[in-house]
Image (cartoon, grey):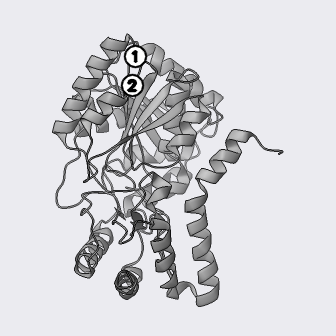
Amino acid sequence: MSIADNIKSFMGKSSLIREMFEKGTTLKAKYGVDNVYDFSIGNPNLPPPQEFTQQLMQSSGELEPGIHGYMPNAGYPKTKQAVAEFVSRNHHINLTGDEIIMTCGAAGALNVIFRSVLNPGDEVLVPAPYFVEYDFYAANAGGVLKTVATQPDFHLDLDAITESITPRTKVVLINSPNNPTGQLYPAESLAHLGELLREASERHGHVIYLVSDEPYRRIVYDGVQVPSILEYYNESIVVTSFSKDLSIPGERIGYLAVHPAATDKSDLLNAMTLTNRTLGFVNAPALMQRVVPKVLDASVDMTVYTKNRSLLVENLDSYGYKFITPPGTFYLFPQSPIKDDMAFVAALQEERIITVPGSAFGGPGFFRIAFCVSQKTVENALPGFERAIKRF
């Protein structure tokens, strides 16, 4: 075999999502794009807000000397300071630009963190269902991803987390609002999580970091507020990107924010600045770093996502599907009407509906619907969802 064994393994684990995407491509070629209802990929279909487009055009025309040169690896100081002020307002804690590192999206930030804090064999604990690429990010740093069960409604099971922590646990990684479930962890759970991690860190004699992956923080409904881990645990790092709230996933721009009271904060930040460079990112994209400070309060128009969510929730409920109504993200994660989620996803494909089995996310028996699509796609898919469940 010409490729590394672990990469071969990763390719197999990621094949379910890729397989669904490719199945959609095949069906579209056969039946036409408008006659296939593809809910497989969380690729935002909304245009970026007008403010972003305006600032992009302005920033791309700037001609000041050195504008395309190397920068500090953690990012432009002015950008970091603007982001720090934004985070301080929204997370109710005072940060400075020194506690921010600009990254190539949230994925880049997670790789930077893991490479900085994990020794070979160290464990990253994550509640399941979870975003499958977390496996790969941990392994990139020689770490091991361990999953822990959540409650039936996908809220954190704090007892299960406590029981799963070992002397090798170095990071607890949460994702709220969550991909694929859409669930959001309330402040009470985060407060209890912070307390149990303080106790576990003291018991095992080393810091256990709490990392929160938050690219969907502003994709929420019904006036929901997302609480911040920074209020409840000092050894915490917030990771996010602008991919979802500005609808610019291809631009690969995000940041990480370290709690100002974190232990050995200076060493931690220096390590992550180094890994930002040595992992090959070097720095976050310069053009995007010039744009985002001017659009930090902007966000996509949530009207389409809100309508799609309502259409799916109301109609799928009437057909007999079981699910939680997601307080955030643009995902719905219904229970499969049969135990075999793969078989039910295949049945949906016969209706030219493309979804992803929950098994791809460590959640067998469920399936994910990414409703970041046109309202017409949702409306046209509804009869197929009804026919599929009636078969079982």
For the residues bearing labels 1 and 2, Cβ distance under 8 angstroms: yes
Q: Quadrant of the N terminus?
A: top right
In the figure, residue 115 lies in which quadrant?
A: top right
* Along the line of sight, the residue nearer the viewer: 35 or 7: 7
Q: Amino acid at mark 1?
A: Lys
* Along the line of sight, the residue nearer the viewer: 366 or 214: 366
Q: Secondary structure at mark 1?
A: helix
The residue sitting at the top extreme is 205
- Which residue matches tag 2? 99
> Dot 1 surroundings within 10 Å: few (below 14), some, or many (20 or more)?
some
**At 59% from the left edge and 22% from the top edge, which residue is drawn?**
120
| Left or right of residue 370: residue 105 | right
Q: Earlier in the sequence, mark 1 or mark 2?
A: 2
- Which residue matches tag 1? 265
Residue 264, above or below 159: above
Q: Position of residue 63 (x, y in %)?
A: 59, 45
